[in-house]
Amino acid sequence: MTSANQLTVLRILSVPFFMWLVASGSVGTALAVFILAGATDLLDGLVARKYGQRTALGRFLDPLADKLLMVGALVVLSLENPALEVRIPHWLPLSVVARDLVLGIGALSTYAYAGTKAFPPSILGKLSTLAQFTTILAVLVDNVIPWRIPFYAGLFGVTALLAVGSGLQYLVRGVRIFACNRG
């Protein structure tokens, strides 16, 4: 277990704690945990590259940790909660979860059919993750320091469009892999 992987595991372990903090109304502390979890995402990659700690386990755990944090945060911030004046609309986590389920099924199918294990992230996928992070951060900050930004509808819409768009892009990649291995 490399130090980079330990940081990733720490991020995974922070997810239920973060969700509990939001659900129990400790939004300020949840914001701090979310920022620290985001920092571990940056650090684990830097540590892995700088100290030659890239591992197969890390390639599996890092995207898993990202998904758990993003989906967990989107879901808990969309639930009825008297501590949240600003919430994420239910359709946003539904669109992200649906995309992730389709991608997971597609990845398993592609692996089973073509033996393809590597699914490198696309630019659109990275932008989708950045939009999700930004949306979550904005909602958390707004619930701690009310600033009532006027562009939530646009932020939620862009986040959903990037999630769906990147999902379609990965779907096209999967179809191409199937087509190349057909003959």
Image (cartoon, rainbow, N blue to C red):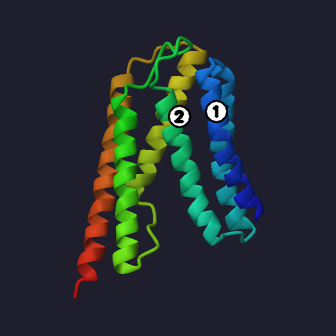
| Residue projecting furthest to the bottom | 183
Q: Residue 102, which numbered label?
A: none
Residue 83's spot in the image, x, y percent? 56, 13
Q: Specify few, some or many for label 2: CA neighbours under 10 Å numbering under 14, 14-19, or 20 or more.
A: many
> Which residue does the numbered mark 1 point to in the structure image?
18
Residue nearer the viewer, 166 or 75? 75
| Within-10-Å neighbours for mark 1: few <14, some 14–19, many 20+ | many
Q: Earlier in the sequence, mark 2 or mark 1?
A: 1
Q: Where does the image place residue 96, in percent across and percent down from the top left?
A: 38, 42
**CA separation in Å, label 2 and label 1:** 8 Å
Q: Residue at x 41, y 53 (%)?
A: 125
Relative side of 169 to 100, left or right: left
Which residue: 56% across, 24% down?
140
* SS state under label 2: helix
Task: Name the quarter where the C terminus is drawn.
Answer: bottom left
Q: Which residue is mark 2?
A: 73
Q: Amino acid at mark 1?
A: Phe
